[in-house]
């Protein structure tokens, strides 16, 4: 089975010293990341971008830690997205049919899956 790679963009330039960092996910997609992943035998699934407020529309907050609340929010949502992807993969993998051990075999090991589950990875851009 083909391994699946899940792509999610986090287009933000909060905390960056240069403007334009938020265009990174678009640039990576424009460079055809999905085709490059397919070319090496992976199954790319693009989830799209997280919704992020433009820096121009947000309050910088503290002078010593500008946009801290917004940065925390984006990072937490990205972490949640990755966690949800991994949990879904674990649920999918655990539902794979297993083969019982041969007669007389030691049963101290878990049964082996009848087919190798595909793995799932999230790539944040």
Image (cartoon, rainbow, N blue to C red):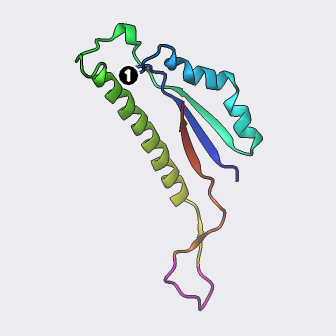
x and y percentages locating residue 41 in the rendered image:
74, 46
> Residue most toward the bottom?
104
Horizontal side of residue 124 vs 37, given as left or right: left
Determine whether the residue tagged by mark 1 lies in a helix, strand or loop: loop
> As rendered, which of 5 and 71 lies closer to the eye?
71
Residue displayed at 38% across by 27% down: 74
> As rendered, which of 108 and 34 lies closer to the eye?
34
Query: Image quarter for residue 117?
Result: bottom right
Q: Is residue 104 magenta?
A: yes
15 to 100, vertically: above or below? above
x and y percentages locating residue 95 in the rendered image:
53, 59
Residue displayed at 68% across by 32% down: 34
Q: How many marks?
A: 1
Residue displayed at 73% across by 33% down: 35
Query: Image quarter for residue 98?
Result: bottom right
State whether the magenta stretch is mostly helix, strand or loop.
loop
x and y percentages locating residue 22 in the rendered image:
50, 19
> Residue most toward the top?
56
Residue displayed at 53% across by 53% down: 92
> As rendered, which of 72 and 115 lies closer to the eye?
72
Horizontal side of residue 22 vs 39, given as left or right: left
112 to 25, vertically: above or below? below
112 to 89, vertically: above or below? below
Q: Give the magenta range.
A: 101-109
Callout 1: few (<14), some (14-19), or many (20+) C-alpha neighbours within 10 Å? some
Horizontal side of residue 118 vs 18, given as left or right: right
The residue tagged 1 is: 15
Q: Is residue 32 magenta?
A: no
Q: Which quadrant is home to the C terminus?
A: top right
x and y percentages locating residue 121 in the rendered image:
56, 45
37 to 9, vertically: above or below? below
Horizontal side of residue 1 vs 69, given as left or right: right
């Amino acid at each position: 089975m083909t391994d699946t790679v899940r792509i999610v963009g986090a287009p933000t330039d909060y905390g960056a010293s240069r403007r334009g960092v938020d265009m990174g996910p678009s640039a990576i997609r424009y460079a055809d990341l999905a085709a490059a992943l397919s070319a090496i035998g992976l199954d790319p699934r693009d989830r799209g971008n997280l919704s992020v407020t433009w820096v121009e529309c947000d309050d910088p907050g503290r002078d010593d830690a500008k946009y801290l609340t917004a940065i925390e929010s984006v990072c937490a949502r990205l972490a949640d997205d990755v966690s949800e992807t991994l949990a879904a993969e674990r649920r999918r993998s655990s539902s794979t049919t297993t083969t019982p051990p041969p007669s007389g075999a030691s049963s101290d090991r878990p049964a082996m899956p009848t087919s190798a589950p595909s793995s799932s990875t999230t790539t944040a851009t």
